Amino acid sequence: MAIKPGLGRKPSNKNPPILSHEFVIQNHADIISCVAMVFVVGLMNESTASFASAFISLHHNVSGEDPSREQPYGKVYTYVAGIKDYCSIFFYTLTCIIMHAIIQEFVLDKISKKLHLSKFKLARFNESGQLVAFYLLSFVWGAHVVLREGYLGQVAQLWEGFPSHPMSFLHKFYFIIQLAYYLHMLPELYFQKIRTREEQQPKIVHSISGFSLIVIAYTMSFQRLALVLLTLHYFSELLSHVFQLIGVFDREERLARLRVVNSACFFLVRFATSVIGVLTLYYGIGGLRSLLALGGLIALQGYLVFSFITEQLRAKREAKREAKREAKLLAAQSSKKAVKSPKDKVKRKKESDLPEADQPTPSPVKQKLK
């Protein structure tokens, strides 16, 4: 029985052997969908519902009541961080892998087929396309929670009552999805066949560093501050990758001035992050733990600024080299057109030395065409 190509890979004329590496890579989204469905089906059975809910539902709620006669609207459930959250992170990591494959096959692959991109531009298009979807969702989600909880209007809420900072459902679910997304980047290296060390290293660093920093903020009760700072960071990253997508379409020269907006937004976000961090961790909370967190936050902002400046300088050098190379190619082509071959010169010279009667005359057909 032939196996039809499933989700998350290109169809192939050959059917790979079952359970081989190529089979797993081609059908990874379908396989993981079946694994995720096991947990969903487990909720329908009373004997396995408690086990399955540990992976799907949120736990460690500290307050909240269901609607009743005395309280028709009930009380809002609030949550804290706990050990059961890692079960939820595992399940939603599977969900992120499935969503990654859906976006890749039904959106990015269809667009890239029409564009006929080179291998380098195709890799950049796929990477930026996936990150734009994630950053857009994270920014809109984070901004909604910030406005709903009132952190923007009352900045003092970022440190008041610390460390007792219970989270609403959307607030906690936001962090679960963040951790799941950064964790899913590691198996995606295998599913996307990224084997070279130069391509693997930045993705591994991005995944581990993002997961570790969010886990530290999540477990040390800095969830409110982390929510605000991540929302600002994702807005800056969203603009950056949108400009990278525009660059794939060979429109960088037209929008070179608009890149100033990206640079200005980046430095404003870094400045705002530092200011909010100092207000919250130094003046608001205080203590040794907060000072260590503030030192790490400032060091991270300095590293991001250094990396951004280095990347901009490298891009300018590459642009200058590309411009010089194109100028040399144009000059070589124009010189070839300007230089005439010696045989043509000798032939024309001999024809000019002949008497006027002996010089070749154009054919009647050419004269009629003229």
Image: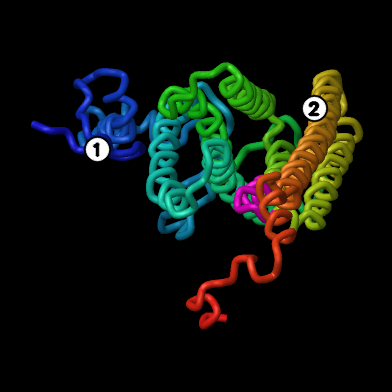
Task: Locate the C terminus and report the quarter of the image it occupies.
Answer: bottom right
State whether residue 321 appears in this view.
yes
Q: Position of residue 304 (x, y in %)?
A: 79, 31
The verdict on residue 9 being magenta is no
The one of 137 and 287 positioned closer to us in this rendering:
137
Residue at point 42% right, 34% down? 97
Q: Is residue 151 left or right of residue 9?
A: right
Residue pictured at 89% horizontal, 31% vertical: 282
Which badge, 2 or 1, is on the more N-terminal residue? Answer: 1
Q: Nearer the viewer, residue 101 or 292?
A: 101
Kind of residue sitting beneath label 2: Leu
Residue 33, position as x, y percentages in the image:
30, 35
Most distant residue in the left direction: 1
Q: Secondary structure at mark 1?
A: loop
Q: Which mark is residue 300?
A: 2
Numbered tag placed on residue 5 in the rendering: 1
Q: Position of residue 76 (x, y in %)?
A: 54, 49
What's the amino acid at mark 1?
A: Pro
Neighbour class for label 1 at 10 Å: few (<14), some, many (≥20)? some
Name the secondary structure under disc 2. helix
Image coords of residue 59 (percent x, y): 47, 32
Q: Does residue 290 lie above or below 69 as drawn? A: above
Q: Quadrant of the N terminus?
A: top left
**Where 83 sits versus 110, above or below?**
above
Residue occupying the point 39% across, 30% down: 55
Q: Magenta region: which residues?
A: 241-251
Q: In the rendered image, is residue 62 in sight?
A: no
- Name the foreground residue: 180 vs 186: 186
Query: Is-magenta flag for residue 244?
Result: yes
Q: Of helix, strand and loop, which mostly describes the magenta segment? A: helix
